[in-house]
Amino acid sequence: MTHSSRSRAYEVDGAADGSRALRKLGLTEDEDVRFMLRGSSMMKIRSDRWQKKRMIQLLDDGMTVWCETKKQSRRAQSQQTFSVMEVESVREGCQSEVLRGLSSAMSDKLCFTVTFKGKRKNLDLLCGTEEEARHWVGGLHKLRAKGEAMNQRDKLEHWIYGYLQKADVNKDNKMSFKEVKSLLKMINIEMDDDYASRLFKECDGSKNNRLEGREIAEFCRRLMRRPELEDVFRRYSGEDCVLSDEELLEFLRDQGEEATLSRARRLIQQYELNEKAKKHQLMMLDGFTMYLLSKEGNIMEPTHAELHQDMRQPLAHYYISSSHNTYLMEDQFGGPSSTEAYIRALRRGCRCVELDCWEGPNGEPVVYHGHTLTSKILFKDVIQTIKEYAFTASQFPLILSLENHCGVEQQQVMAGHLRGILGEALLTKPLATPPCQMLPTPQDLRGRILIKGKKQAEKPTDAEASSNSSSSSEDDEDEVDSNQYKKKGKRKMSKTPPLPPNGSKKAGTSQLAPELSELVVYCRSTRFRGFDQSLLRPADEITSFSEGKARRLVRSSGGHFVQHNLHQLSRIYPSGLRAHSSNYNPQEMWNVGCQIVALNFQTPGAEMDLNQGRFQQNGNSGYVLKPEFLRGRDVTFDPEHPARGPGHNPKQLVITVISAQQLPKLNKDKPNSIVDPLVRVEIYGVSMDNAKASTAYITNNGFNPQWKTPLTFNVCIPDLALVRFVVEDYDLTSSNDFVGQYTMPFSSLRQGYRHIHLLSADGTTISPATLFVHVKVTDP
């Protein structure tokens, strides 16, 4: 049997054979899915004033939903469809901010909300009947589950099928050469006309200048060949191009993985597609490809992605995923505030959220960015949302960081809402009596919500009373500067003078209400008094630093900062000068053991990539145990002079960037625009470890570019380092455009041949886009 006859083609039987796509999903007879395929006329709702009738329909690939729009702009057309794979959740009833506000005017059983991964806005819908709503909610749930269960091969097949549909302009289930050329540009490849024509003719078995059925399948099979992966396969399989269980065992040894004959045989049974090969304990190229594209072939160590760390150490020994200005969907001067922003952060594993609390009308406190044009949301609505979503992604404790600008009366209202809504989840007393010298552990606090804020002393002195003023939870002079800037920025944006928050003259000067003070247990906000005082202070104190002050302390007193963070929590927040809610580099703060490094989750970029990379380990629980040299009793680590202390464990990292697969097309409005990709690998850690290196760019090929370029790095403190893979579209005349990225801890890297499943700028998957690399870590 020849190698070509053994290979199994991608089963794309026709350009518009939607029934086959549904058969693959196993849902051809499903009542809900069949209802969705017929389409429904629903009310799309954005507010009490904007409610439009729209047709919503599942397309016959079973993974794409079409939404009617009346706008003719290109952007509107691109928003007409969404993939089920983009859906974060489907909420039954009036469970969005928009629908909750209208719940008195419509039946809960007629409504549902589709929420999306990334920054796409929610889709709020009102159905004509309860049956219609039930079919759509049930169908979307089933399709999401099927999509999540797809292997990489099935995802790739759905991906190519979608483009085949678009390229088949006359919908005759056949592909002319012109349509094939159009397809190639859609999937991000500029192919030489002579080569494309030769490939077309080789696949046109009927010689009628049209590809159909199996001819299309053969064309796709040839197009999606992976010669660089075939080279690896042949190196281990030998001339017969079939891997025996013994040959696969040799490959596993070279990968640095568990190498036993029983595991090799399990992999064959799990990933080989040919039943006859399975029976004889053999793996062919397609099975080998399936294995390397699976989770077992990922670059991330799979056990690190699960909850695997010791969760019984004091809170101060963990990095804690933290958000700044959590209520904002956009920038901090004029963007909307929304409870949806809290939901998004909590779903991403965030364990410390911020509430800027101001006096509101009718005796109800509001949350917004004071002295700006950001919209306001009710404090009680935020707390209700937090109750519902606090432990969706993680069972470990959630910290509510209160920036309190309210007078005593509305502080009492806040305390009432916290107790009444959060109930037993709210921690109101220490776990031990008397309190121990160390903070409790994440395990001790599972399912509990902690309040971070000011706390009254039992017998306050005049100075303590002044310090306990409720003006803010941020605790150094930089915050005063940022508030002044907020006011200046406001004046630049508007000719009218800024109004005081809801007319309150008390906010910012009133005393702390005892009812709110007593809810602060383990996160008592205090002003920084210097590192010489740190070890003398109780463990339940937490100090907030602006990024600027923290950065100065890192560079001048890094070792002392590390010791400060041994038993106390530190919160770092972005400068108020960041008008567009940009972020700082969190790595600098993690290097000295700062736990609550708060970032603007609503702002994508390299900084949030680092945050996602740091916290994707340990089950996305939002808690990551700091390296031992940042939590030991006799710590001497200094990130500015790391060679002098513990943690110094130098490694040489060689990453060979081999190829990329199915990179997304950036300029979808320009059919002839093809990406010119390059790959950059970046190391983030202590100063001496920070480094970047890039491949050359490849012209006009985002479909299957190949580099085979080794990039070498020396890393001295690997336990602190993060590795970021970035793909960009090279541009000669301007800055390169972002294509995709993946960020992970150095300590979670797996050696050998690995696939990297790329993410978008907002941290969501851009499946089926991948990088194929080889990783080697050695002692220098």
Image: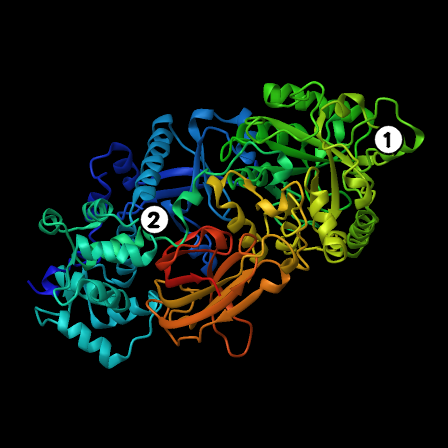
* Residue type at the position of mark 2: Lys
Q: Secondary structure at mark 1?
A: loop
What residue sits 75% from the left and 24% below the top? 516
Q: Is residue 238 left or right of residue 184?
A: left
Q: Secondary structure at mark 2?
A: helix
Question: Is disc 2 surrounded by few (<14), some (14 to 19) or many (20+) residues within 10 Å?
Answer: some
Frontmost of labels 2 and 1 is 2
What residue does disc 1 label? Answer: 510
What residue does disc 2 label? Answer: 295
773 shown above or below 439: below
Whether residue 161 is visible? no
Residue 750 appears at what percent x and percent y? 40, 54
Q: Is residue 484 left or right of residue 445?
A: right
Whether residue 106 is visible? yes
The single residue placed furthest to the left in the displayed view is 1
The colour scheme used to paint the residues is rainbow
Q: Pick the residue in front: 39 or 114.
A: 114
Q: Pick the residue in front: 79 or 282.
A: 282
Residue 637 appears at what percent x and percent y? 66, 52
Which one is earlier in the sequence, the residue at label 2 or at label 1? 2
What residue sits 63% from the left and 46% below the top? 630
Residue 574 appears at what percent x and percent y? 70, 51
The single residue placed furthest to the bottom in the displayed view is 194
Q: Which mark is residue 637?
A: none
Q: Is residue 387 left or right of residue 72?
A: right
Question: Is disc 1 surrounded by few (<14), some (14 to 19) or many (20+) residues within 10 Å?
Answer: some
Q: Is residue 601 left or right of residue 711?
A: right
191 shown above or below 314: below
Location of the N terminus by quadrant is bottom left
